[in-house]
Amino acid sequence: MPFITYLSGLLTAQMLSDDQLISGVEIRCEEKGRCPSTCHLCRRPGKEQLSPTPVLLEINHVVPLYTLIQDNGTKEAFKSALMSSYWCSGKGDVIDDWCRCDLSAFDASGLPNCSPLPQPVLRLSPTVEPSSTVVSLEWVDVQPAIGTKVSDYILQHKKVDEYTDTDLYTGEFLSFADDLLSGLGTSCVAAGRSHGEVPEVSIYSVIFKCLEPDGLYKFTLYAVDTRGRHSELSTVTLRTACPLVDDNKAEEIADKIYNLYNGYTSGKEQQMAYNTLMEVSASMLFRVQHHYNSHYEKFGDFVWRSEDELGPRKAHLILRRLERVSSHCSSLLRSAYIQSRVETVPYLFCRSEEVRPAGMVWYSILKDTKITCEEKMVSMARNTYGESKGRYYLTLSKVSPF
């Protein structure tokens, strides 16, 4: 039966008339649009004209469905069924703010699973822009108002490169409650907790302050509830910004190397040039090469002169360090001008006021943990790159969320 025919039948039977009004229900109908041709219910026998599609009515007032029921017994049964369906997957009963699962709602490990454990979504903190060594991540607390209780979040981070077997190297695992809030973790990582636009919603954050520049890092997060279940993983992969480069110093070193290479180069001068080039970072070496070729390439490029003056072995030891610079940073290091700057950015540093007993982690609710927070500052080193003096552009880290 088409929907419009059903409504016409109701009106004809006076089920929606004023003398027999259904509490909370108001229906207005209008013909607008058509049913899709694939819908056999919309076809009227003997007529080519398709019946109009029903239009979603404007919602003036939102009330739970069970409040529309007059009988108290039916109302309570309907309310219980709706609460069970929404909070306990229809496999348990809502008791206060938790789910009592049915006997059939247990997983293979013997743990009740009628109340789902949502997946947290890891993301970059919008208030802290990543730098060459500092990255701040955050996520919204996934604990629902009724049902499962989150006891901890486990954050894994590891550096990924061509020299590392990602299957064998698991990186470092950090417990938000036991390692970060307790203060037992390293000083290079700090935890925070704040509130979103709604006071009831908590936002957790972790700031890493000692990462390697121009490094590819993978961060993975999952939640743990009070029964020991793990949520699905949330992953963010990013490359930190390029290392801080002192462009003026790089140009000075390029001039120094040219003077050492120019004319007859004694053994002492060869060793001095070798030591100078080996002492600087790979990024600084790349920038030295750029300045050398920009000013003195007509006398021979940097690679050829190094091999000629220092010999193939020493030149190879120097030049192979350039392979450590990623293609992303190498393109930026060819910019005409580079300016370095260091700025301080505030972040939230929180510590737990209570000690979680060993072996009782699963029975503690993270949201109920009493913490003390203070605002601290972290130094952020950045490069700005430009094609002319006074005109610079800022580069951001490459981020890939999964």
Image (tube, grey):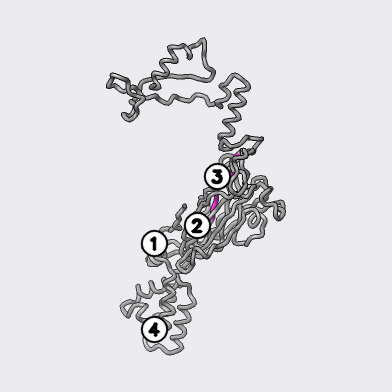
Question: Dot 1 surroundings within 10 Å: few (below 14), some, or many (20 or more)?
Answer: some
Mark 1, residue position:
386
Question: Dot 4 surroundings within 10 Å: few (below 14), some, or many (20 or more)?
Answer: few
Mark 2, residue position:
130
Mark 4, residue position:
312
Question: Dot 2 surroundings within 10 Å: few (below 14), some, or many (20 or more)?
Answer: many
* Residue 191 drawn at (x, y percent): 61, 54
Whether residue 313 is visible: yes
User: In this orientation, which residue lies closer to the viewer: 63 or 66?
Assistant: 66
How far is mark 2 from mark 3, CA to CA? 27 Å
Badge 1 or badge 3: first in the primary sequence: 3
Instruction: Tell me which amino acid carries mark 2.
Output: Pro
Badge 4 or badge 3: first in the primary sequence: 3
Q: Is residue 332 above or below residue 34?
A: below
* Residue 354 drawn at (x, y percent): 72, 51
Badge 2 or badge 3: first in the primary sequence: 3
Question: Dot 3 surroundings within 10 Å: few (below 14), some, or many (20 or more)?
Answer: some
Mark 3, residue position:
118
Instruction: Tell me which amino acid carries mark 4.
Output: Pro
**Label 4 SS:** helix
* Residue 23 drawn at (x, y percent): 54, 18
Q: Give the residue displayed 43% in from the left and 19% down from the top.
A: 28
The answer to whether 245 appears left or right of 72 in the picture is: left
Disc 2 vs disc 3: which is toward the camera?
A: 3
244 is within the stretch colored magenta = no
User: In this orientation, which residue lies closer to the viewer: 367 or 264?
Assistant: 367
Badge 4 or badge 2: first in the primary sequence: 2
* Residue 87 drawn at (x, y percent): 58, 37
